[in-house]
Amino acid sequence: MEKSDHQDNGLLVPLCVLRKLTNNNRVTSLEFINNDKLLVSGTCAGNIDFWDLKTSKYVLSNKIEGNHYNQINKTIYSENSRSLYVQSREGELYIMESIEENEKLNVIKTIKKSKLGYSMAKLAYFSSESCINNNHINTGNAKSPLFPLVPTEDSIVLLDPRNNHNHAITFKLPEKKIDKLMEIETLSEYSLIGGFESGKIAIWDTRKYYNDESNNSGLVINKYLNDDDKSPIMSIKRAFNRIWISSFNSKLQVYNRNNFDIPIKTVTPLKGVVDKISVRSDYLVTILSYATNGILELFENKNIEPVKAFNTNLKDINTIEFSNFSSSSLFACSTNTISIFDVCPDSYYNYQETTNLTRQ
């Protein structure tokens, strides 16, 4: 994949743009796999495509059958089991068989969940030996398997990685069918956090799950993030020991993952509501998306300071995703097409030129 110039007067120029000539539907999920060799994308029409990032062409295409609008919300690829977990907007979790080059994927299991009318949260996962040992789950010969975390209308289900029809843990939502779950994220190898439309956050701990006499399924925190401003939670992402949380009131707060009483820092967003947050796999860099105006803002996590803001010239960005490969600076965002960027080369950290996106 040949690189072009990174920027021109604040405009971030993509390394490449991926598009299909037919069935060019809105792209609703993205995932880098195989050390950045491939990108998996899902569309609002239920299509799953595998793109070769060296040639910028799709090499495999699959269709999840179902209703006319069977949107793909999220995919997670397991390197160890060579399986692909696919979450649809209709509430199903599809488990697809091993990815073989130039062969169609087949659905080997379909787990029917409640429709996601009460949840906007996307599929997430644990990957932890401690989680395995603590919950006495038999993983066979698998090493550090993924534990899919599947949101439903009244719970978050942790699936057994060896028998995905069995629930290892069911985390009950504090106010099921009343408060819409907007986002879930793992806090540690034991715990996870959920953000809600009411402005509340909830935290569950797997270590407390089996000893929870209150029948709260390991729930340890259920509180408003801001008592004085109960604005819906938009996005939650972990960057090592810090948690970035954005709200609909254009507030962006960074917390220590062990203390949600007082934020480490409250950041004034550059262009209004931060609807999506993505974190590089080495946790050093966080990027914010302002979907309606195509602006991306890059932050350095150690000091929680802005590095640079970019204009992508993309309107109504659907999803953003950093590479999962350690220290890679590849980043993707989608509309009806997929734009691949190199958002944090070393030169940006010393870049001093003023652009029209400079903070006031």
Image (spheres, helix red, strand yellow):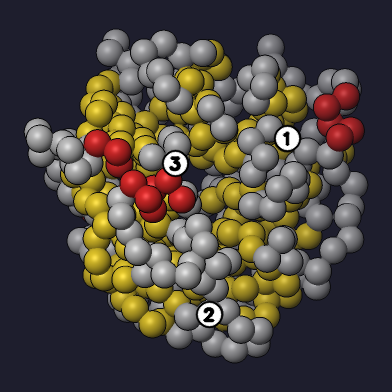
Q: Name the front one of labels 2 and 1.
A: 2
The residue depicted at 71 percent of the width and 48 percent of the height is 326
As drawn, 75 above or below 12 = below
Q: Secondary structure at mark 1?
A: strand
Q: Name the front one of labels 3 and 2.
A: 3
Residue 358 shown left or right of residue 257 in the figure:
right
Q: Which residue is mark 3?
A: 189
How far apart are labels 3 and 2 at the CA level? 26 Å
Mark 1 or mark 3, which is nearer the start of the sequence? 3
Tell me the quadrant of the picture where the C terminus can be found. top right
Q: Nearer the viewer, residue 68 or 221?
A: 221
Q: Which residue is mark 2?
A: 98
Q: Position of residue 146 (x, y in %)?
A: 45, 59
Mark 1 or mark 2, which is nearer the start of the sequence? 2
The amino acid sitting under disc 3 is Glu
The residue depicted at 90 percent of the width and 47 percent of the height is 5
How far apart are labels 3 and 1 at the CA level? 34 Å
Residue 134 shown left or right of residue 291 in the figure:
left
Q: Nearer the viewer, residue 308 or 210?
A: 210
The residue depicted at 53 percent of the width and 26 percent of the height is 242
As drawn, 84 above or below 155 = below
The amino acid sitting under disc 1 is Phe
Q: Position of residue 128 (x, y in %)?
A: 46, 49
Tell me the quadrant of the picture where the N terminus can be found. bottom right
Q: Position of residue 307 (x, y in %)?
A: 74, 25
Q: Name the front one of labels 3 and 1.
A: 3
The amino acid sitting under disc 2 is Ser
Specify the label residue 310 is tagged with. Answer: 1
Q: Position of residue 248 (x, y in %)?
A: 40, 28
